[in-house]
Image (tube, rainbow, N blue to C red):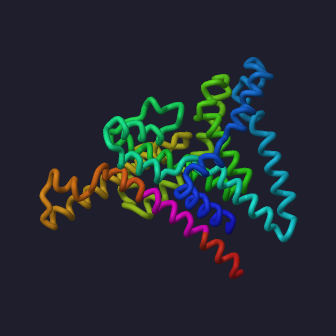
Amino acid sequence: MFATLLAVVVALVLGHLARDLTATLRHYGWFEGWLDWLHARLGEDGAFGSRWGIALALLPPLLLVALLQWLLDSVLFGLPGLLFAVVVLFHAWGPRDLDRDVDDIVEAADGDGRRAAAAALWPEHRRDQASLHPPALVGAVADAALRRWFGVLLWFLVLGAVGALLYRLVAVAAEDRVSTRLPPPMVHGARALLAALDWPAAQLVTLSLALVGNFDVVLGAWKEAGGADLRLDTGFVAAAVRASVRSEIADEAEEYAEAGVPPGSALVLELGPLPELRDAMSLVWRSLLLWLAVIALFVIAGWVS
């Protein structure tokens, strides 16, 4: 638990303050090269070209990480193992800084610049769907937070360094540019596995959104979007964030009205550009802080016991 807390803090601080360094350290060209090598050697007719091809690609790097973690945990009271876990989680986090991406959208000088900045919120294989429509932007923030933060964090908590790397490599094979060069059945398998990994994280994110926001609004959006159904669809997270943002902006508008601020442009000036993005980031940050607070409680309880 302490490794998780330390690694998340390191990932967030470096991601925000050292953007270029972080982008270099979180480059997955090595895995893309491995996938291309397997594709060239095994072709599309064998096991690699099937839905189970993702397992062949994942097994060697994950076994290597598991072996290193096991060996390092027994050295120097486990300190090298702790540092190794921090490094792996840092590598798997992101890879882009979500705060900086949202700031780039808000601070863009014109519509074209804002549209180009907004594309960074979408996965590489869906960037042609990028939109400046506020509900779409809010949904993209929710999905990006799930992919960049919460999915990695959950599987690190469950499986350690192997879990964090598992989640990130599956996301790379399913959504990054390398997916356009791989056999379609293999990519479908990777996306199915990613959906299975995302589903429990999405449920916990929605619960945390309910706790840090309007519980009734989030619960209603979760039910309406099919969150209670046993199917591997995480669209209910975006629906919950959209509903929470609408509720918070409505509350703010009511407060400004009560304070005598006229509706229209004056309210827009008070709230700033794209207030939906600001509120969406506030919600996902509060949810992440709730997760970290729970982890910190477990760390303190472990030290006390």
Q: Quadrant of the C terminus?
A: bottom right
Task: Tell me which corner region of the image, top left, top right, bottom left or bottom right, holds residue 209.
Answer: bottom left
Can you see residue 11?
A: yes
Give the answer, above or below, for where 62 lies relative to 245: above
- Which residue is nearer to you in this view: 38 or 294? 38
Task: Tell me which corner region of the image, top left, top right, bottom left or bottom right, holds residue 90.
Answer: bottom right
Q: Is residue 226 left or right of residue 301?
A: left
- Which residue is nearer to you in this view: 43 or 290? 43
Q: Residue at x 43, y 64 (%)?
A: 212
In terms of secondary structure, what is the magenta stretch mainly?
Answer: helix
Q: Is residue 63 left or right of residue 120?
A: right
- Which residue is nearer to you in this view: 106 or 160? 106
Instruction: Give the residues in magenta.
Output: 283-295
Q: Give x and y (percent) for residue 83.
A: 74, 62
Q: Give x and y (percent) for residue 158.
A: 69, 56
Q: Give x and y (percent) for residue 7.
A: 65, 61
Q: Give x and y (percent) for residue 89.
A: 67, 55
